[in-house]
Amino acid sequence: MRLIVTSWNINSVRLRIDQVRRFVETVRPDVLCLQETKCPDDRFPLKDIRAMGLPHVAFSGQKGYHGVAIASRLPFSATDVMRFCGKDDARHIAVTLGAEAGAAAGITLHDFYVPAGGDIPDPELNEKFAHKLQFLDEMRAWGRDARPAHGPAILVGDLNVAPLETDVWSHKQLLDVVSHTPVETQALETLRQESGWIDAMRRLRPEPERIYTWWSYRSPDWAAADKGRRLDHVWVSRDLDPALRSVEVFKEARGWERPSDHAPVTAVLEL
């Protein structure tokens, strides 16, 4: 069975519901994982999402900030929400896809939205950056203790870190810019490796290929400048590695009217 999973920081699901619909009609993912939905649970556009052929929906949101959601053509169970750093700020949700997804034991799918970290890469001067580092530390502890990758599992989301030199338009110029500082890239790669996750995109599209998923709103001509960063990720457990077929960035969506600054990332697995 072919399983198509998309991760997308939508930057307000209600504001960009038409873009979501357009993408789903074009790519037809089996599972759509959204971040930064910016929507309290009682205002989530559930009917619109279900009308797109994604009847099974789980979401965790709050007014104006953060928020994650998983919408699926396939049924799922065991919805779970984890809280990090003592904050109830809607940055994680997980579901377990059943045998319909193609794996007898089911597949656990984690959707994360890691804090951006503000503008100053100093935890003593910037509490947002301190929060980000603490969040990554707690993710590392979760990976070590809960061993989430020791079974069929997928982790997706806006992890807000571009870990490799070829994940940014200029490694040298961004070394002291939040999302590509050494303390962040080391933290993300350490938690991924210790937990046993495989970076699906780099597994199939290794360096030196440059891959970006985010382009700043501040750029007057983002496409021509192409000063991007790979902030959005798809990781898989080792037993799903043989099933990987492709991981693609749908860059076209960044050029749509009133777009998110992130493009959707879609992984295809043959199970």
Image (cartoon, helix red, strand yellow):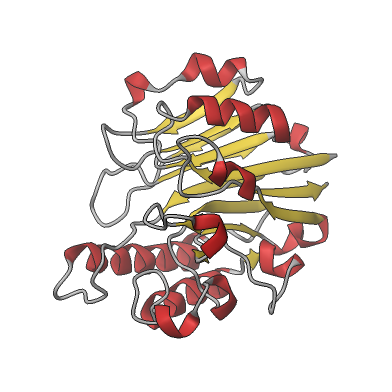
Residue at 54%, 31% in the rendered image: 19
Q: Residue 159 or 222: which is nearer the viewer?
A: 222
Q: Is residue 71 left or right of residue 118?
A: right
Q: Percent x, y for residue 115?
A: 33, 57
Q: Percent x, y for residue 269?
A: 78, 49
Kindly tell me whether residue 227 is visible in this rendering.
yes
Residue at 40%, 36% in the rendered image: 37
Q: Is residue 68 left or right of residue 130?
A: right
Quadrant of residue 30 within the rendered picture: top right
Residue at 38%, 66% in the rendered image: 136
Q: Residue 101 or 246: which is nearer the viewer?
A: 246
Most extreme residue toward the left is 125
Tell me: residue 252, above or below residue 187. above
Kindly tell me whether residue 106 is visible in this rendering.
no
Quadrant of residue 63 within the rendered picture: top left
Q: How many marks?
A: 0
Residue at 67%, 45% in the rendered image: 107
Q: Quadrant of the N terminus?
A: top right
Q: Residue 17 or 224: which is nearer the viewer?
A: 224
Quadrant of residue 11 within the rendered picture: top left
Q: Percent x, y for residue 35?
A: 45, 43
Q: Percent x, y for residue 33?
A: 55, 40
Most extreme residue toward the bottom is 172
